[in-house]
Image: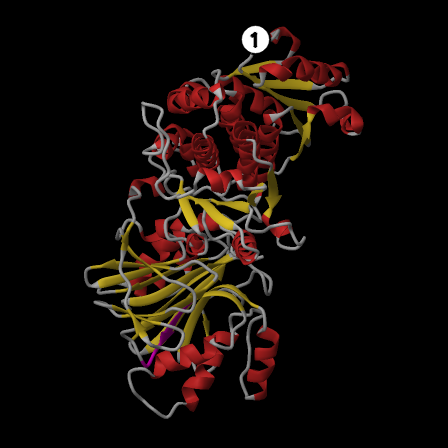
Amino acid sequence: MCGIVGYIGNKKAGPILINGLLRLEYRGYDSAGISTIEKDKISIMKDKGRVKNLYNLPGINDLEGTIGIAHTRWATHGKPSKENAHPHMDNSKTFSVVHNGIIENYHELREFLSSNGYKFYSDTDTEIIPNLVHYYYSKDENNDEFKFLRAFKNACSRLLGSFAIEILCKDYPNNMIVVRKDSPLVIGKSDGENYLSSDIPAILSFTRNFYLLNDYEYAVLSRDNVKFYDKDLNEINKKTETIEWNASSAEKDGYQDFMLKEIYEQPTAIRETIGSKLNEKLECSFEELDFTKDYLKGLNKIYFIACGTAMHAGLAGKNMMEKLCKIPTEVDIASEFRYRNPLVDDKTLCIFISQSGETADTIAALKLAKSNGAKTIVITNVIGSSITREADYSIYTHAGPEIAVASTKAYTSQVVLISLLCVYFADVLGMDNPNVTNLKEEILMLPKKLEETLKDTKKIKDFAKKVYQEQDIFFLGRGIDETTAREASLKLKEISYIHSESYAAGELKHGAIALIENGVTVVGIMTDPNLVDKMVSNLQEVITRGAKTLIITNQDIDEKRFDVVINVPKTSPFISPILAIVPLQLFAYYISKEKGLDVDKPRNLAKSVTVE
């Protein structure tokens, strides 16, 4: 949820740290702060609210330190306040810490430290960390170069839960130490300086060379070097990985908001995702996978497991997998999958979807599936993310960094990659199905059709202006269009705060129609030619009761029956969610703008949900 930044080099750390925090604002937060070492003492500057508030703090422009850590906090323990904001210091002001995650045994540790004379000035779980480090530091009589590291390791060995931690020590002004467990943290390597962050885009403009930490790996950073140690403090070797994202992708490039920019980046993102997976000869390949025909034929079930928008991508995958590959397929919410003792064994393939690769519930569900003998595939956008180090196989979308909290290009890229995976499985299975060839052709045409969809947005913008003050909006679809209805409803909730519901249109008369009254807006999606007549009939039921209607379709219908009709290009029904969702992403965006809301940082939400 929260964001971490760190810097050690020869430049003033303050401006670099604040710049990094600004790039992490999309993660969701309620306070921010930085800590630097200034002439052998630790300085902390922090405040409730936005990162920009730091610029107004007395003395912020006088900081000279060239080593520092920074944090944006999303409240878990303790209300949003300056006192609860990170960084936190120990009582002796020897150590400064920032921390992402949750320390599950912090009550026990707080009582232990209180009994040893330590006092606490915040309600956070984080404040125990620097004090616990100090406890071990004060007990160590060996004043060698490893004293700081030993104390930190001993403290972390007592922490239960998830964490990514950066720590400074005034006695070691040329080093900072970091560790992670179930929470993202990367180290960016450059000449004469090193950077840290919980997310690559925050430091992508400084370097493309990154160290990726595994759980319980400690990194000791100096200006010219990074040394790595395992949980027993044995030194280990690590190599950097090069991230090929374009740094400008993390900038707005003239767009008003990241969300709008990312909506318009979808043709490029999908073109990149198709990449080497499908060529003009309609040959589909996944070099990352080694599945045989016998293995796929022996499966009794496939699961798509994810949260939120990624779960909706899985719903699109279920339709394709069952129809093209004839394998029973289920879609499960990761947080529910974990706790319902799912029927998973070595005849099960579990496919996990996570944009960030750090979603806590999804990672936990993956570990559960593996423990039951299932093979696991992860679909993610982030190379080297936590989930990729747990899965048997990792396949990547190539959407580039997605900054806005509400996912757009990551979702459509996920659906494209899942479509390609279904096609690949069908090829391996030798399925003689004309739908497979047609789907390959349609996938290759998607980028151009998306560009066409994005050319004229006036009708959707005008309709958004008419309905932005409404309290309730309903989304209806049948078959694959019900998946699009779900995702469209979620987008509207996320960024406009309008109550919205999605329904399989055939379920309307089983209760939900009681909510339809004069003036209510109903959005209908119609892209499956086999279900158009049924869908029109369902929509007539709401029109009769006074509803206004917005229709997204690529079918030939009597447009006079509806208030507004948005036409999208025709394509295979299997991948129609990719085209049909685009005007509805814009619908949510324009409504939010009309309401004067922060589109990129909606209230109460965070980009990466790294705690349960």
Question: Residue at label 1?
Answer: 556
> In the displayed structure, would residue 207 be above or below residue 42?
above
Instruction: Please state which of residues 552 and 334 is positioned toward the viewer in this rendering.
Output: 334
350 sits left or right of 522 in the view? left
Query: Taking 594 as reference, is 34 left or right?
Result: left
- Residue 490 vs 212, above or below: the answer is above
Image x and y of residue 93, in percent: 42, 79
Question: Residue at the location (23% across, 68% down)?
Answer: 225
Is residue 168 part of the magenta span, yes or no? yes
Q: Main secondary structure of the magenta part?
A: strand
Image quadrant where residue 381 sits: top left
Is residue 170 magenta-colored? Answer: yes
Q: Nearer the viewer, residue 283 or 573?
A: 283
Of 344 and 310, nearer the camera is: 344
Label 1, residues with CA under 10 Å away: few <14, some 14-19, many ≥20? few
Amino acid type for the residue under numbered disc 1: Asp
Residue sitting at the far left: 191
Residue 375 shows in this picture = yes
Where 608 falls versus 274 (above or below)? below
Chain part drawn in magenta: 165-171
Q: Which secondary structure, mark 1? A: loop
Residue 331 spot, x, y in % from top left: 60, 40
